[in-house]
Structures are given as C-alpha cells and as structure tokens.
Image (cartoon, grey):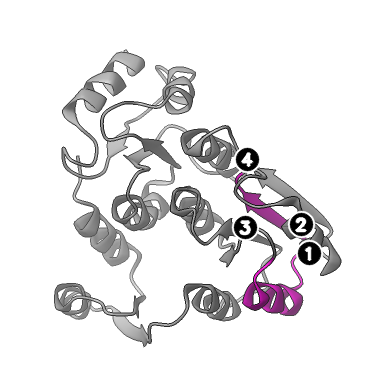
Amino acid sequence: MLDSRRSALDAMRAGGGTALLIGEVGAEAAAWARANGLTIERRPQRDPTELAAALARDLPHRPERVIVTRRAAFADALAGAALAAHTGWPVLFTDAAQLSPATAKVIRELRPDRVHVLGGIETISDDVVVDLIALGVREVTRLAGKDRAATAVAIADEGIRQGMDPRRPVIATGWNFPDALAGSALTRGVGGPILLAHPRRLPTATAAWLAARRGQLDWAIVLGGDSAVSADVEDQLRDVLR
C-alpha cells in the first residue's frame, strides 16, 4: 500500500514544474514543494464549481473534450480525475438537475467538441445533457455503470481508449475521497486508471475488470491504510489476480 499524500507529492516531484496550492493547504505540502524546487502558485479557496471553471480557463490549450461530473458525487469525480490527468481534459462540476451556470459559461468559452458526463441519469439528469447540446456541444456521452465502482470501470475503459496503461491500475477506496484524489497525480506517472474498492470488500465490477486482465498486469497499487482498503480486500485482490 502507498500513503496517498506522499504518493501525490512524489508524483509531482517526478513531473517537476509548478505546484498549484488550492485553499488551505498544509505547511508540510508547501514546504515539501519548495524544498523540491517546484514553483508554487496559490489559488484562494472559492466555490468548487467556479474554481474548476477557472482552472479550465488556465489550460495552455483549448480542450477538444471536457469531463462533467456532479459536484456531490465525489466517487465519479475521483475516477474522472485520473482520466483528466492523462488526457489534459478539464473536470467541471454540475448540479444534478441542470447545468451549473459557471460550468455553462466556461463551456461556452472553450467550445469543446465533446463532453463526457460521469454517472447515470440518477446522478446527472438528461436535462443537463440537453443544456450541453444547447451550448453547441456536438457529442455528449455518458460514462456510467450501475454503481460507483462500475462507473469507475467505464471511466477506466475510456482512459484505455485514450492510451492509459491497463497493466498498471491504482486501487483506492470509493467511499472517501482523499486517497483517490491524491492518487490521480500518481496515475499520471504510472499511466494506469483508478479503480474503486469498498473498505471491506472488492466490488463486483472492479473484480471483473481485474479478472479479465489476469496475467497481463504489471502491478495493482493500493492506496491508503487498512481503514481505507482492508487487508481482506488485498487478499481478494490477490485471489482475483492469481
């Protein structure tokens, strides 16, 4: 297992460049970034939807695609963050029933050709899809499954279509957000997708995805301690991969 905070910091060090510190970032992270020669850029804490839109505007290129996830559905956003890290597509937030105004505004500015909506209609309604099409988006596709783990698998499959490495998955709990959020930086380095686990069991969708690739994996990295992903889940992972 890997400590998620240290893994993310090590991934930043490997990549070099700028450490973007958002909101109330701990002194340890800031000191570590300085000690490792990273340029620090701070962003004041603000509404997450507006912050995501601002970060999308700061991209050095106009993205052909963007990822839209429900603001309250953190598990979908976690898996989507790994896809975003690999492709350079921004992640934007919305409400369930209608497209958030800040997100609509930045999509109008960026004019992406395609939007990936994360989650089924119970997570993000078809009204949001209608709103996106009305903004001129040519194609809106859902990446969704019957539960959060299955949605992560759908996102992983899209990542593989975009060149992510299926041999190097990263496993994180889908029932709390810090490990997978930090792990999205790690996936940029190792090249694999994020899959979700329950703290006490391996979800069916995750197990099936891994079993289909038995004998083909270089490794499966598990993020967090026993309270995040238990030793029982590690044993289930080993059983699936034998």
Which secondary structure lies at badge 3?
A: loop
Which secondary structure lies at badge 2?
A: helix
Q: Work out how far the residue at label 2 is from the one at label 3, CA to CA, in angstroms.
A: 9 Å
Region rendered in magenta: 99-119
Q: Magenta includes 242? A: no
Q: Which one is in front in this view, the residue at disc 1 or the one at disc 4?
A: 1
Marker disc for residue 230: none
Residue at the spot of label 4: 161
The quarter of the rendered structure image containing the C terminus is top left
Instruction: Determine whether 193 is above or below 209 in the image.
Output: below
Q: Quadrant of residue 130?
A: bottom right
Residue at the spot of label 2: 127
Identity, as a three-letter code, of the amino acid under mark 1:
Asp
Q: Which one is in front in this view, the residue at disc 1 or the one at disc 3?
A: 3
- Location of residue 121 in the rendering, given as x and y in whole percent from the top left corner: 67, 45
Which secondary structure lies at badge 1?
A: helix
- Location of residue 135 in the rendering, given as x and y in whole percent from the top left corner: 82, 70
User: Callout 1 environment at 10 Å: few (<14), some (14 to 19), or many (20+)?
Assistant: some
Residue at the spot of label 3: 96
Q: Are marks 1 and 4 in contact (CB under 8 Å)?
A: no
Identity, as a three-letter code, of the amino acid under mark 3:
Ala
Horizontal relation, residue 158 to residue 19: left or right: right
Q: Work out how far the residue at label 1 is from the one at label 3, CA to CA, in angstroms.
A: 12 Å
User: Earlier along the polypeptide chain: callout 4 or callout 3?
Assistant: 3
Residue drawn at x 58%, y 76% is 53
